[in-house]
Image (cartoon, rainbow, N blue to C red):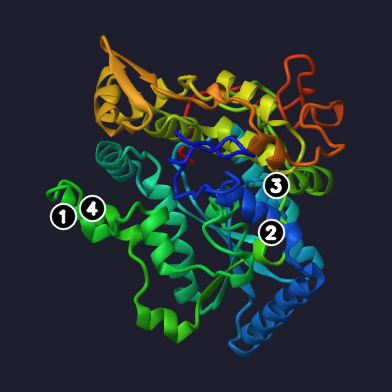
Amino acid sequence: MKYCSRCLYPENAKPTIIIDEEDGICSGCKYHESRMKLEINWEEREKILENILSEAKKMAQERGNYYDCIIPVSGGKDSHFQVYILKERYGINPLLVTFNHIYNSEAGMRNLENLIEKSGCDLIRFTANPHSARKISRFMLETVGDLTWHYHAGIMTVPFRIAIEKNIPLIVWGEHGFAELTGIVSLEDFVEFTKWKRREHDMRGFEPHDVVKKSDGKITMKDLCPYIYPTDEEIERVGVRGIYLSNFFYWDAKRHAELMIEKWDFSPVTYKRDRTFNLYAKIEDHANDVHDYLKFLKFGYGRATDDASMEIRHGRMTKEEGIKMVKRYDPVEPSSLQTYLDFLGITKDEFYRIIDPMRDENIWRKNNGTWYRKDTIANYVRTDAIEAARVKQAGDRTFSEKNRNLYYNDRLPPLKKGDDRVDVRKLQFRIL
């Protein structure tokens, strides 16, 4: 297995990552590097955004609309940042839209409530019935090894349906996540939301009618009605477009988290997590840990690889420090797995029987009934290419005292907040 010379990603990382044949650096690292090496005028890009938002406000007034745009939110640090920037810097009045994950954590609900309180914005929260979510989740687990299809499909569909219903043409997203991870687009493209990206990446290639057909009618359109995307005619009539703020700002999730902790009381968790050292990202629901574990079981890497690679790219962590995090966290079975299996109504043995055939044979091998990885990033050997690819180390170190509340460190654990919702890990789902 080839690995990036700079970060920790393997060549089988999803979605598609490309490792340069000459320098061994992956497309995700090159995308990150382009933010600094290309002649990007961020002030000019902010002016472009300002013009887009001014036009949205003008259009809202002409249409007699109280809302200037829609912001899809989960309640996480990026949601806080998106709303904060648009409200405080540009005077925008957004309508916030969220799709209930069903598997909500106490920390996630605390931060969603905090976002509404601090922003003073209206929120529409769509909750699909848990019986349908359960059926869809099990079907997707058995079909593609994914348990979060319903809420990824939901947040990529419901904001557009509300945009049509309320005649709001602009939807503002945060980062283009796949670009940040694997560099599948260029900053020069100013890429916007596309129906193709929604289907192929967020929905695993399945529209609702595909699910009905593939499930042999066990899942019906009644179960899937929240995920029906507006027609092209409806989109064109309202003029709906979706933009990404990461095209207009230098995107650093850590910096956003720090700002939102200071300005709007966003709260990371303060307990040790099973599958990553990061305390401020992906804390909205319990499914994230299991979803990430599925990635490890299929492709041999997980959330710690994602988080450590981003820290390496920002110069806050060395490759060697990142490998220690990957060895410590990536293989761990999450303690929330049983909670999810109870919700789904299957045993742990059934879970592994479903997933085992989906393991990437390029990385996994079975011997005497036990699965093991044929290769891992921990086997890497220092080469001239790896030394040449190293990022200049920043003064801001991941596990410094300054960052103790952002990254878990046994030697310097985070300070408790005095709120059980973020201080105490509870494995029960919060459906509402």
- Say above or below: 38 vs 7: below
Residue sitting at 75 percent across and 62 percent down?
Answer: 85
Query: Do callouts 3 and 2 mark residues in contact (Cβ within 8 Å)?
Result: no
Mark 3 or mark 2: whose residue is earlier in sequence: 2
Q: Earlier in the sequence, mark 3 or mark 4?
A: 4
Please indicate whether residue 332 sits to the left or right of residue 66 in the image.
Answer: left
Q: Is residue 234 left or right of residue 219?
A: right
Q: Find the distance from the CA under tag 1 to the CA under tag 2.
A: 43 Å
Q: Quadrant of residue 317?
A: top right
Q: What whole-number distance in Å separates the C-alpha atoms at marks 2 and 4?
A: 39 Å
How far across and how far down the image is residue 105, in percent?
54, 33
Separation of marks 1 and 4 at Cα, in angstroms: 5 Å
Look at the image and tell me whether residue 74 can be seen: no
Q: Residue at x 52, y 25 (%)?
A: 330
Mark 2 residue crowding within 10 angstroms, few (<14) / some (14–19) / many (20+):
some
Where is residue 88? Give x, y as percent. Answer: 80, 64
Apparent side of residue 120 relative to residue 274 in the rendered image (left or right): right
Residue corresponding to mark 3? 253
Q: Which mark is residue 34?
A: 2
The residues tagged by marks 3 and 1 sit, at their Cα atoms, a distance apart of 39 Å
State the CA–CA distance, disc 3 to disc 2.
17 Å
Q: Report the amino acid beneath label 4.
A: Val
Which mark sits nearer the N-terminus, 1 or 2? 2
Q: Residue at x 29, y 18 (%)?
A: 366
